[in-house]
């Protein structure tokens, strides 16, 4: 049952992330400043999580030292403030489909850092080890196809998309420029490197600080402070800071509650239970959901390259997960055999003790 919960959790996480990409792209098309968006998003997430922390983890919280807080603050800067601010800027220059596709490089960067920190091992002499490496290669091949090959385009299924009616002219200029598209791809790559490092370092910090709700809330608070400094440095126009009863407010509330609040907590839970690579290898689901949503919500056109790349990414997902499951199935019987030997040793000790004369002390 616990294994099923882990799979359901990663599916929900990727569905939430897909919604984040689609809504964020829609408001950026409308001209919203990405740095201000990040600040409001993290602020809403902090406010959303604080009462949950007070209700569920106030009494049994792990003691928080200054050194652990500093690690969480730096972790928030690398994985949230830096990674997501760069990602939002890249999303302005590119498309929602490419943004979701590049996220599928996350298993490669996460696996690299996990091997570097000796959290994962690769044995090329075994079939599971070969399957894991082949899955990562297929993942990279799928991303390369999505980034550099479009192919024939399919006819749009929806002629009047929900969020595709009002696009900012500056955004159209950004997208039409090949230089900005290349810069956006570079920003996406830097963002994914920071994201992969963040996933691996989270696993290290969670070993010494297990209160996941407080851990998540502190990351949100830290990133909100950091994002405010970034936003105020890049945008001084008061009109950009105003939120009305429109898609901008909906996107900020959704990202603050569902992404920053719910998905970050679920992500910390999955990393603690299954490890960072398991979480990272679920990212192809994000692409599939985003491609479908971009057609119906943003009016994007699906190309043959998107279909082929998506297929390769799904193959890579199941290749790595199959390799990891086979490695566990090999390790579990040996551990079970060790456990079965313990009662035998204890029974022999009791038998010997029963044959000894009673102590005079």
Image (spheres, rainbow, N blue to C red):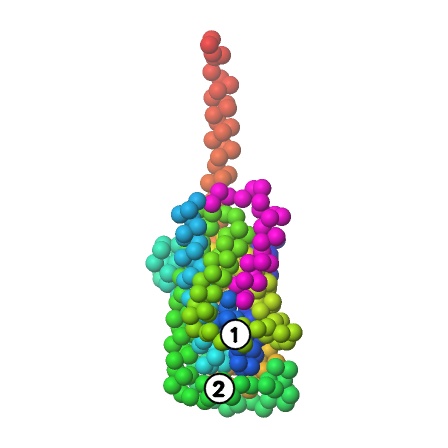
Which is in the foreground here, disc 2 or disc 1? 1
Picture coordinates of residue 290, whole percent (x, y)? 56, 76
The image quarter containing residue 133 is bottom left
In space, the residues marked 2 and 1 are separated at their CA atoms by 19 Å
Picture residue at 52% right of the left edge, 74% below the top: 238
- In the image, residue 213 sits, relative to residue 245, either above or below, namely above
SS of the residue at dot 2?
helix
Sort mark 1 into few (<14), some (14-19) or many (20+) by Cα contacts within 10 Å.
Answer: few
Mark carried by residue 55: none
Picture residue at 51% right of the left edge, 59% below the top: 220
Relative to 180, 51 lies left or right: right
- Asked whether 57 falls inside the magenta stretch, the response is yes
SS of the residue at dot 1?
helix
| Residue at image mark 1 | 238
| Residue at image mark 2 | 170
| Residue 324 shows in this picture | no
* Most common secondary structure along the magenta stretch: helix
- In the image, residue 188 sits, relative to residue 329, either above or below, namely below
Picture coordinates of residue 95, whole percent (x, y)? 49, 81
Label 2 with label 1: CB-CB less than 8 Å:
no
| Residue 219 shows in this picture | yes
- Asked whether 246 falls inside the magenta stretch, the response is no
Q: Which residues are magenta?
A: 40-64
Picture coordinates of residue 297, whole percent (x, y)? 61, 81
Picture residue at 63% right of the left edge, 89% below the top: 159
- In the image, residue 357 sits, relative to residue 98, either above or below, namely above
Sort mark 2 into few (<14), some (14-19) or many (20+) by Cα contacts within 10 Å.
Answer: few
Picture residue at 38% right of the left edge, 86% below the top: 179
The one nearer the camera, 248 or 257, is 248
* Circle nearer the N terminus (2, 1): 2
């Amino acid at each position: 049952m616990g294994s099923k919960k882990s799979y359901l959790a990663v599916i929900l996480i990727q569905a939430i992330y897909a919604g984040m990409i689609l809504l964020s792209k829609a408001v950026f098309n409308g001209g919203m400043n990405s740095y201000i968006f990040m600040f409001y998003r993290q602020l809403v997430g902090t406010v959303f999580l604080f009462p949950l922390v007070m209700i569920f983890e106030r009494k049994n919280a792990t003691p928080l030292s200054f050194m652990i807080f500093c690690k969480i603050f730096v972790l928030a800067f690398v994985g949230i403030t830096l990674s997501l601010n760069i990602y939002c800027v890249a999303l302005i220059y590119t498309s929602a489909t490419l943004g979701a596709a590049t996220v599928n490089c996350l298993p490669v960067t996460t696996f690299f850092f996990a091997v570097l920190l000796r959290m994962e091992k690769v044995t090329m002499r075994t079939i599971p080890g070969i399957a894991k490496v082949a899955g990562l290669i297929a993942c990279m091949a799928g991303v390369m196809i999505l980034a550099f090959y479009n192919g024939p385009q399919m006819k749009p299924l929806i002629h009047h998309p929900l969020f595709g009616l009002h696009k900012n002219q500056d955004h159209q200029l950004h997208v039409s420029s090949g230089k900005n598209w290349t810069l956006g791809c570079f920003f996406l790559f830097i963002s994914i490197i920071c994201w992969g490092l963040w996933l691996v370092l989270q696993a290290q910090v969670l070993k010494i600080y297990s209160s996941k709700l407080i851990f998540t809330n502190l990351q949100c608070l830290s990133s909100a402070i950091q994002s405010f400094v970034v936003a105020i440095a890049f945008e001084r126009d008061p009109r950009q800071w105003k939120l009305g009863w429109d898609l901008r407010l909906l996107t900020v509330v959704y990202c603050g509650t569902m992404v920053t609040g719910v998905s970050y907590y679920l992500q910390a839970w999955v990393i603690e239970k299954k490890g960072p690579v398991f979480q990272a290898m679920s990212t192809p689901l994000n692409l599939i959901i985003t491609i479908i949503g971009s057609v119906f919500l943003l009016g994007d056109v699906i190309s043959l390259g998107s279909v082929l790349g998506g297929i390769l990414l799904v193959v890579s997902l199941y290749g790595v997960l199959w390799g990891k499951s086979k490695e566990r199935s090999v390790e579990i019987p040996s551990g079970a055999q060790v456990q079965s030997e313990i009662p035998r040793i204890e029974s022999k000790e009791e038998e010997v003790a029963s044959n000894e004369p009673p102590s005079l002390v």
